[in-house]
Image: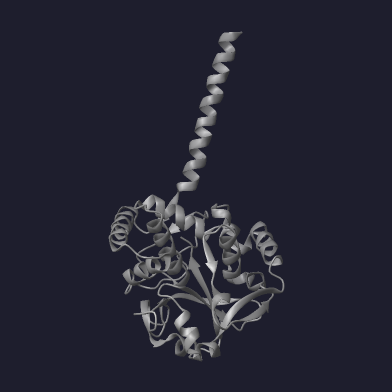
Amino acid sequence: MTFFRSIICRLLSVALAVSAVATAAAQTEARFGCEATDTTFISELLDRGAAAKPASPEAAVAFYGRSFIGTPYAAHTLEGEPEILTVRVDSLDCTTFVETCMALAYTTMEGRSSWRDFVYNLRRLRYRGGEVDGYPSRLHYICDWAVDNRHRGNFTDATDRFPRYSYVTRTIDFMSRHRDAYPALKDSANYARIRAVESGYSLHRFPYLKTADLNDKEVRRAFRDGDVIALVSNLKDLDVTHMGMVVKDSPTAEPYVLHASQSHGKVEISQQPLADFLRRNRQWIGVRVFRLTN
């Protein structure tokens, strides 16, 4: 009897070990453009970031942002089945550019330099609770991305620290209203989970800097090199339609926008200062500002 009990215990131990390995593998799984070259590039980039010794998380974000200048723009790189973490450094859209730079900066500020640490931090930023659990677990809305990451201490919303700011209230349900534009929402379970997320953002109130506020010199000076910015839309069912980061040559210099530009097809620094950049598109009414925590 003791012999059989021992065998059963060993089998259970093996089963638990296999399960643990499978769970760990699921959490480290990632889809690369080209794993061999991408992981090498990320490791080399992290080494350069460490050597630069950024003085703050924002400085680290700005360092990595500038490192991607000229990288081609590509949309929809995260779409694919099944939903797993996608890592692309050969082409970026406005959101993946920001997330990639923030994850690299977070890794550097932790004193780490492995591409695996970067992958872990990218997952932390992109998915609810830092865990991949299907398409709806990705933080599609910037308001949801902000609330979830702020709650976990990954970054702060610095918008209400500026000399001037206002509030806007939105009911966020763009994805369910435009279900046909999202192939993953053909699945009824995905659609139901997205609707559940949206229900938490009915009459959602958040701070922003109006475009007119940027006429104030003190507001412009309050921006830091490497501040992440989300451009607030005037659409009634969506909060943000573009992202980037602020770059400044000095604390008193004019803020410019470093972003993945769809119209110019690459990562670039705007030709106009931030205020003029916002005024060129009537869909944008202002910005939110986020800062990576140390």
Q: Residue at x 55, y 83 (%)?
A: 286
Q: Residue at x 49, y 55 (%)?
A: 123
Q: Residue at x 58, y 54 (%)?
A: 129
Q: Position of residue 49 (x, y in %)?
A: 32, 61
> For this view, does 134 lie left or right of residue 229?
right
Q: Nearer the viewer, residue 167 or 84?
A: 167
Residue 2 picture quarter: top right
Whether residue 43 can be seen here: yes
Q: Nearer the viewer, residue 208 or 23?
A: 208
Residue 32 picture quarter: bottom left
> For this view, does 71 lie left or right of residue 227?
left
Q: Position of residue 31 (x, y in %)?
A: 43, 55
Q: Is residue 24 above or below residue 285?
A: above
Q: Position of residue 244 (x, y in %)?
A: 45, 75
Q: Is the N terminus in the top left, top right, bottom left or bottom right quadrant?
A: top right
Q: How many marks?
A: 0
> For this view, does 216 lie left or right of residue 92?
right
Whether residue 140 can be seen here: no
Q: Is residue 4 above or below residue 154?
A: above
Q: Is residue 111 above or below residue 60?
A: above
Colour theme: one colour
Q: Position of residue 58 (x, y in %)?
A: 42, 68
Q: Residue at x 41, y 87 (%)?
A: 273
